[in-house]
Image: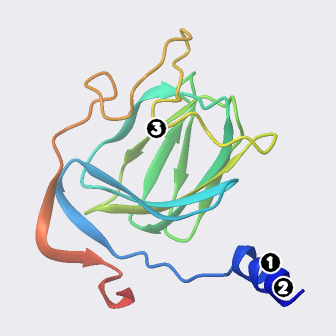
Amino acid sequence: MEAVAEKQELEHPKAYRYSLKTPYMQQGRVTQLVAKTDNMWIHTKINSEGGENAVHCHLDEDHSFVVLEGQMSVFDEKGNELKIDKYQGIMIPKGAYYRYLNTGDGNLVVLRIGCGIDAKPPRGDDARLGPDGKEIPSDSEENKTLPPIEMPGKFFAESAG
């Protein structure tokens, strides 16, 4: 009986700490996975300029952006704009079309929180569709991705370890 109790204890999920430390960017953007479970994932995203510039939606996740530094503008497929300031967020349900841009001074730092729909994890980073129904890879020319260049030795949340 003792061996069964030990096995159950080993399989029991445990809480864990994660850090938001992410490099600032001279050019482009970085998306860094900081925590993940089967049904939820958290990324830090830092954009020097631009953003996710191709209008797209995700069919397999709800997600939210929370601005930690800077300002972002989020646009729907009709060009309607929502300005999201520091310490504000936006909820993006599955199937909602959007694109975002860094519209502040300096780097845009956001926390991206996603969760699976119907307890299914997402298909992956390329699981984004344009209004025409075609997939748009995250790091593609179509999504106006620039080669990422980090600022040497400069980090958001550096003290977080």
Residue 53 percent coordinates (x, y): 38, 32
Looking at the rendered structure, the kind of residue marked 3 is: Asp
Query: Which of pointers 3 and 2 lies earlier in the amino acid sequence?
Result: 2
* Helix, strand or loop at mark 3: loop
For the C terminus, which image quadrant? bottom left
Residue located 62% across and 53% down the image: 64
The single residue placed furthest to the right in the displayed view is 1
User: Viewer-nearest of labels 3 and 2?
Assistant: 2
Residue receiving disc 1: 8
Name the residue tied to disc 3: 125
**Residue contact between numbered discs 2 and 1, judged by CB atoms under 8 Å:** yes
- The residue furthest left is 152
Q: Residue at x 54, y 83 (%)?
A: 17
Label 1 Cα crowd, 10 Å radius (few <14 / some 14-19 / many 20+): few
Task: Say whether residue 89 is left or right of residue 93.
Answer: left
Find residue 23 and report its horizontal and vertical position in percent. 25, 68
Circle 1 or circle 3, nearest the eye: 1
Q: Position of residue 107 (x, y in %)?
A: 28, 62
Dot 3, crowdedness within 10 Å: few (<14), some or many (≥20)?
few
> Which disc is residue 5 wearing?
2
The answer for how far apart the CA atoms under marks 2 and 1 are is: 5 Å
Q: Which mark is residue 157?
A: none
Q: Closer to the N terminus: mark 1 or mark 3?
A: 1
Q: Name the residue located 51 percent from the left edge and 37 percent from the top edge.
A: 124
Number of marks in the image?
Answer: 3
Q: Residues within 10 Å of mark 2 (few under 14, many from 20)?
A: few
Q: Determine the secondary structure under disc 1.
A: helix
Q: How is the image coloured?
A: rainbow
The amino acid on which the numbered mark 1 sits, given as a three-letter code, is: Gln
- Amino acid at pointer 2: Ala
- Spatial CA distance of label 1 from label 3 is 33 Å
Q: Nearer the viewer, residue 3 or 113?
A: 3
